[in-house]
Image (tube, grey):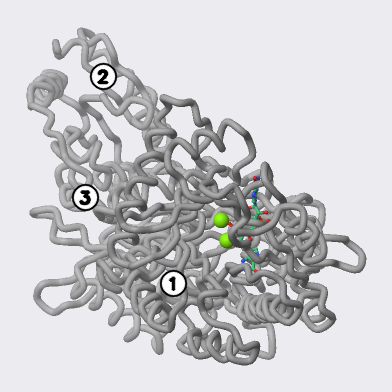
């Protein structure tokens, strides 16, 4: 590109100075102006293709040095030529600017020809691309560089005696310490800022944190206490990283991500308490977060707030695969990015493990921004693993509720999308509340239901296509609720698997089935084998085989009468254990049925690894069974595989004649479905068998 077409920015608070430079650059077609660092940063963010910047040092709002730090920390602008406009070559500040990455200096009064030559030279330099360093502070700050009000302090360690001095600070940092930028600068010049602001009894621990960051060579969170000018003590959560650019003297850049006022007023507690902050990430811990939210809500009774919680999907895997150090570093960065997001708008904290929470004014809550910053973090971690973060959001309605109850609501919303790759957030709302209440009622009533016999046995006949007769049946539970009527198992089985009540229920159902089988025998009715469902929770119980055998013994039955249905998800959970469990069951004489084959992550491995007797194909998941459809081809293939393995095939959920005929022609052995019979109570089942005799 012709140099005349390149974008040039002049940043100076003095109009005369700006127009002077502009006149010099008369031949250039795209010259822009900004009156301070804030404006300049905003311009550069919109125009990252800018080729040259003239930058004054002393400016209001954000001065040249701060702007320089920010630009050099951002990979996009690391190589951007910057000419500092300095008062004189003697100025001390020039040295700082050089260390922070200034390219050239122009001294007042400007010599126009020189300025022009400098511009032309720099515009001729090839712009190198720099890669963002994944997971580094720079990528972190880069993602936040719009947040111009950050507190940043840049420290430098003397190579000779190891003393720490301040290379640079932002006005916000000075303000956090209770000083104006000018006052703080005076402290810095006297070399006494750190000693003045960090209380004596805390200086060692501050030094230690700094030493640790040097040792670990990665961004780390730490907290420091500062004694403000008004004697109040403030805890600053910082994220620190050494800036490792060549010739930079390796300054330590500390970004303040959160602040906590210590409660000196309460009971004169003047001790610096570490207990208020989370040790790893430096942001609020659970109690402090709860406390802050309560205070925010009380102090702003007329504002609406949202409270959210989020966690990392399968964080344990990250720890296992990459090690806890990487896991910790992710938590630290996530904490820091969240803290930046809520700074000045609300509160955030780590509730424990990988669960974080935040609370913000509804008006300030930028869901898209939050998700974007989470995505950004994930993209820049440099892991061959996509971080999936799920957020649950509770728009606070009941302000008087416990903060922990509010977190529970956000957690509940989050739990509805757990494991879902495509949905990253969920709101807690009325229908969800109702669904959760309904679930709660089920959980409240379950024990009583078991004791009062409200769980009843339904049987669904299984029909042989070869003999055109029922050959067996499946035992299915129904809950006869005194108020709600019949409740289908779809509403409660997974809840019971979750809280393990399924162990009791399954045993109960097996017993009802055995009792019925024995009763038929007593009444001299034709024997009919019945299959029962064995939840994957029970499959891995060590005494499953002995429990089943003693049940059979109690009713004087053989294992051939009680068949066991296990789902393929059990194989997904733990193949090794399933192989062991099924070997034991088969050795004891049980026949194993694979339930719902084709509904989940069908695994041909399972068929290969485990000797199984019956394969139950789930029709509802095969969709359209047009003769030449791929569903038909898959079904044919699976039936063939099962046949070759010597397994009996049962198609479940058969509803139409077309499906029936297709299955018949495909060589499927048995069918179970509404077309033939629905699940029914025992008396109806017997009536049914009377009209349709079994084999
Ligand atoms: P499952 O073991 O696959 O049982 C078959 C399900 O398919 C039954 O649903 C049955 O009513 C339904 N079904 C049968 N034919 C058709 C049809 O033609 N069309 C349609 N749309 N559905 C049909 P149900 O009884 O609601 O049971 C649902 C699931 O709950 C069962 O699926 C099983 O996984 C579980 N379950 C039921 N009873 C028990 C139990 O006592 N213990 C355990 N662990 N799980 C049980
Ligand atoms: Mg079943
Ligand atoms: Mg099934």
| Sooner in the amino-acid sequence: mark 2 or mark 3 | 2
**Circle 1 or circle 2, nearest the eye:** 1
Measuring from the top left, give residue 181's x and y in whole percent: 43, 56
Residue contact at pointers 1 and 3, CB within 8 angstroms: no
Measuring from the top left, give residue 320's x and y in whole percent: 29, 71
The image's mark for residue 282 is 1
Residue contact at pointers 1 and 2, CB within 8 angstroms: no
| Sooner in the amino-acid sequence: mark 1 or mark 2 | 2
| Sooner in the amino-acid sequence: mark 1 or mark 3 | 3
Please tell me in which quadrant of the rendered image residue 473 appears: bottom right
Q: Residue at point 69% right, 79% down?
A: 521
- Above or below, comparing residue 154 to residue 53 in the picture: below
The image's mark for residue 7 is 2
**Residue 101 seen in this snapshot:** yes
- Does dot 1 land on a helix, a strand or a loop? loop
Please tell me in which quadrant of the rendered image residue 110 appears: top left
Q: Mark 3 points at which residue?
A: 133
The image's mark for residue 588 is none
Q: Residue at point 71% right, 53% down?
A: 692
Q: Left of 294 or right of it: where is 650? A: left
From the image, which quarter does the N terminus lie in? top left
Spatial CA span between label 2 and label 3 = 26 Å
């Amino acid at each position: 590109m012709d140099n005349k077409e390149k974008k040039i920015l002049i940043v100076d608070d003095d109009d005369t100075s700006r127009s002077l430079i502009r006149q010099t650059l008369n031949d250039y077609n795209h010259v822009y102006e900004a009156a301070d660092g804030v404006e300049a940063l905003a311009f550069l963010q919109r125009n990252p293709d800018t080729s040259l910047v003239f930058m004054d040092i002393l400016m209001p709002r954000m001065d040249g040095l701060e702007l320089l730090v920010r630009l050099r920390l951002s990979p996009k602008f690391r190589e951007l030529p910057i000419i500092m406009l300095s008062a004189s070559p003697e100025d001390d500040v020039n040295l700082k600017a050089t260390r922070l990455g200034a390219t050239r200096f122009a001294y007042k009064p400007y010599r126009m020809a020189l300025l022009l030559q400098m511009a032309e030279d720099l515009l001729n330099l090839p712009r190198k691309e720099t890669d963002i360093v994944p997971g580094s502070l720079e990528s972190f700050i880069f993602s936040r560089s719009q947040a111009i009000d950050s507190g940043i302090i840049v420290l430098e360690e003397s190579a000779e005696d190891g003393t720490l001095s301040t290379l640079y600070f932002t006005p916000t940092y000075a303000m956090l310490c209770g000083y104006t930028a000018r006052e703080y600068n005076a402290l810095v010049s006297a070399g006494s800022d750190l000693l003045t602001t960090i209380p004596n009894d805390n200086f060692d621990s501050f030094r230690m944190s700094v030493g640790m960051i040097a040792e670990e060579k990665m961004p780390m969170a730490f907290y420091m206490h500062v004694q403000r000018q008004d004697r109040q003590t403030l805890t600053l959560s910082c994220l620190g990283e050494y800036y490792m650019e060549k010739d930079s003297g390796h300054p330590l850049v500390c970004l303040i991500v959160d602040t906590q006022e210590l409660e000196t007023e309460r009971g004169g507690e003047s001790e610096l308490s570490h207990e208020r902050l989370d040790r790893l990430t430096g942001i609020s811990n659970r109690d402090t977060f709860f406390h802050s939210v309560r205070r925010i809500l009380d102090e702003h009774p007329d504002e609406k707030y949202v409270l959210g919680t989020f966690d990392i999907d399968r964080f344990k895997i990250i720890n296992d695969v990459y090690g806890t150090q990487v896991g910790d570093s992710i938590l630290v960065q996530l904490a820091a990015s969240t803290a930046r997001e809520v700074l000045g708008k609300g509160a955030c904290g780590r509730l424990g493990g990988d669960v974080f929470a935040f609370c913000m004014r509804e008006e300030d809550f930028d869901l898209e921004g939050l998700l974007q910053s989470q995505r950004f973090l994930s993209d820049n971690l440099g892991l061959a693993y996509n971080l999936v973060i799920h957020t649950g959001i509770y728009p606070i309605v009941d302000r008087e509720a416990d903060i922990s109850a509010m977190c529970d609501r956000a957690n509940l919303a989050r739990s509805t999308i757990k494991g879902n790759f495509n949905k990253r957030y969920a709101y807690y709302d009325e229908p969800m509340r109702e669904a959760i209440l309904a679930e709660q009622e089920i959980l409240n009533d379950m024990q009583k239901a078991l004791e009062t016999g409200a769980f009843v046995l339904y049987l669904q006949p299984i029909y042989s296509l070869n003999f055109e007769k029922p050959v067996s049946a499946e035992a299915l539970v129904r809950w006869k609720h005194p108020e709600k009527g019949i409740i289908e198992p779809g509403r409660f089985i997974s809840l019971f698997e979750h809280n393990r009540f399924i162990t009791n229920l399954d045993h109960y159902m097996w017993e009802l089935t055995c009792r019925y089988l024995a009763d038929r025998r007593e009444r001299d009715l034709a024997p009919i084998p019945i299959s029962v469902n064995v939840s994957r929770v029970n499959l891995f119980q060590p005494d499953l085989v002995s429990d089943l055998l003693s049940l059979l013994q109690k009713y004087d039955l053989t294992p051939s009468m009680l068949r066991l249905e296990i789902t393929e998800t059990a194989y997904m959970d733990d193949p090794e254990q399933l192989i062991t469990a099924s070997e034991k069951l088969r050795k004891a004489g049980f026949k194993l049925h694979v339930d719902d084959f084709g509904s989940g992550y069908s695994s041909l491995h399972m068929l290969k690894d485990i000797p199984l007797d019956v394969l139950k194909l789930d029709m509802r998941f095969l969709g359209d069974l047009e003769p030449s459809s791929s569903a038909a081809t898959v079904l044919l293939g699976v039936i063939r595989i099962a046949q070759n393995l010597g397994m009996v095939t049962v198609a479940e959920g058969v509803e139409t004649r077309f499906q029936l005929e297709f299955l018949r022609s495909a060589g499927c052995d048995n069918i179970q479905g509404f077309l033939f019979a629905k699940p029914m109570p025992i008396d109806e089942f017997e009536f049914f068998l009377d009209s349709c005799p079994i084999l």
